């Protein structure tokens, strides 16, 4: 991150090492003497301002000086700053080497509530019904295909928990639909694992409706867009558009986590019922 501070906006020239040696040496001394990251941050901020007295500060510089040390006493650019200085011979030792790094807690995606799931499904169904009504009976328009595809996408994610890459890789032959059962075949999941995932009734009906109107001359990829198969990014964008219409923040990973949360609750409920029955 500190390396970006060397780059000047005009012509891409770098600061000469001699221009950095004294400031970096003083910064290292300041850090060792006071053990104050706030003081170091203030020093770097003033150093940047001195080098840009009459020119606008580049955005990357603004981002750096706009991020003072946290209350925990850790400043992320501190280590890379002195590490680069040691590598380039500006200073001999890294005074921040012993500063412990604070690991960012991994954020678990929030599962959707039952009302949010209903709102998404209701919005997808409404868009499909509107497209069908506008097309008229026995007429299949591009809007009908698109609406049925999006509804199938939503229900497939909701009831299978597939990853977005796995959905993008599905072929029409990977969907097996029967009157009372169905499954989707994942031929190359994470770790190249083959698996078969059963389909909920809502997912079966939505997929059957989409397959009934899906153009047969568009290749074997299951989900098609205007210009060919929907890639992972295209699928994410379709879900985002549906979520925007339903006023629900949704991503493929959120839908996957929603299914996992629901299954966990059902397992816990079955376990409680079994325990209560034994007592």
Image (cartoon, rainbow, N blue to C red):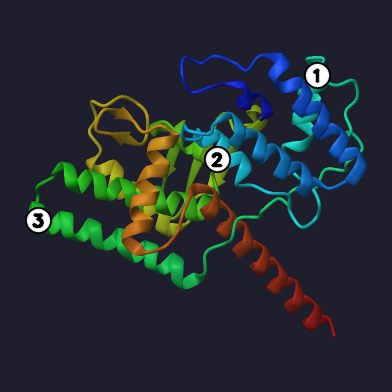
Q: Quick one: 81 or 45, which is closer to the camera?
A: 45
Say which mark, if any, is on residue 134: 3
The Cα–Cα distance between marks 3 and 1, rounded to whole angstroms, is 71 Å
Residue 111 is left or right of residue 173, and the answer is right
Nearer to us: label 2 or label 3: 2
Position in image of residue 137 (x %, y %): 8, 54
**Quarter of the image containing the C terminus?**
bottom right
Position in image of residue 167 (x %, y %): 47, 38
The image shows residue 74, relative to residue 180, as above or below, that is above
**Quarter of the image containing the N terminus?**
top right
Q: Residue furthest bottom?
A: 279
Q: Name the residue that disc number 2 marks.
A: 62
Marks 1 and 2, the one that precedes in the sequence: 2
Cβ–Cβ below 8 Å for labels 1 and 2?
A: no
Say which mark, if any, is on residue 90: 1
Label 2, secondary structure: give it. helix
Nearer to us: label 3 or label 1: 1
The image shows residue 277, relative to residue 108, as above or below, that is below
> Which residue: 60% across, 64% down?
262
> Which residue: 45% across, 35% down?
232
Q: Quick one: 42 or 220, which is closer to the camera?
A: 42
The Cα–Cα distance between marks 1 and 2, rounded to whole angstroms, is 24 Å
Position in image of residue 184 (x %, y %): 49, 41
Label 1, secondary structure: give it. loop
Q: Residues within 10 Å of mark 1 (few under 14, many from 20)?
A: some
Q: Residues within 10 Å of mark 3 (few under 14, many from 20)?
A: few
Q: Quick one: 30 or 70, which is closer to the camera?
A: 30
The Cα–Cα distance between marks 2 and 3, rounded to whole angstroms, is 52 Å
Residue 201 is left or right of residue 97, and the answer is left
């Amino acid at each position: 991150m500190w390396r970006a501070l060397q780059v000047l906006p005009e012509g891409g020239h770098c600061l000469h090492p001699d221009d950095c040696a004294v400031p970096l040496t003083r910064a290292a001394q300041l850090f060792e003497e006071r053990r104050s990251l706030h003081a170091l941050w203030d020093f770097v901020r003033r150093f940047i301002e001195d080098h840009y007295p009459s020119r606008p500060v580049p955005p990357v510089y603004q981002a750096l000086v706009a991020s003072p040390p946290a209350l925990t006493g850790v400043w992320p650019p501190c280590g890379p700053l002195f590490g680069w200085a040691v590598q380039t011979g500006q200073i001999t030792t890294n005074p921040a080497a012993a500063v412990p790094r604070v690991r960012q807690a991994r954020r678990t995606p929030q599962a959707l509530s039952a009302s949010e799931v209903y709102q998404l499904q209701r919005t997808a169904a409404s868009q499909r019904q509107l497209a069908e009504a506008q097309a008229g009976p026995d007429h299949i328009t591009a809007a009908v295909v698109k609406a049925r595809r999006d509804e199938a996408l939503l229900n497939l994610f909701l009831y299978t928990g597939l990853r977005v890459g796995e959905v993008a890789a599905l072929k029409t032959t990977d969907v097996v639909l029967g009157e009372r059962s169905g499954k989707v075949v994942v031929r190359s999941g994470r770790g190249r694992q083959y698996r078969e995932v059963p389909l909920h009734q809502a997912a079966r009906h939505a997929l059957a409706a989409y397959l009934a109107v899906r153009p047969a001359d568009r290749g074997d990829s299951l989900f098609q867009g205007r210009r060919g198969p929907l890639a992972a990014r295209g699928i994410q964008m379709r879900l985002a558009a549906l979520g925007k219409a339903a006023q629900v923040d949704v991503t493929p990973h959120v839908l996957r986590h929603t299914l996992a949360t629901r299954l966990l609750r059902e397992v816990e409920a079955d376990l409680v019922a079994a325990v209560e029955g034994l007592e």
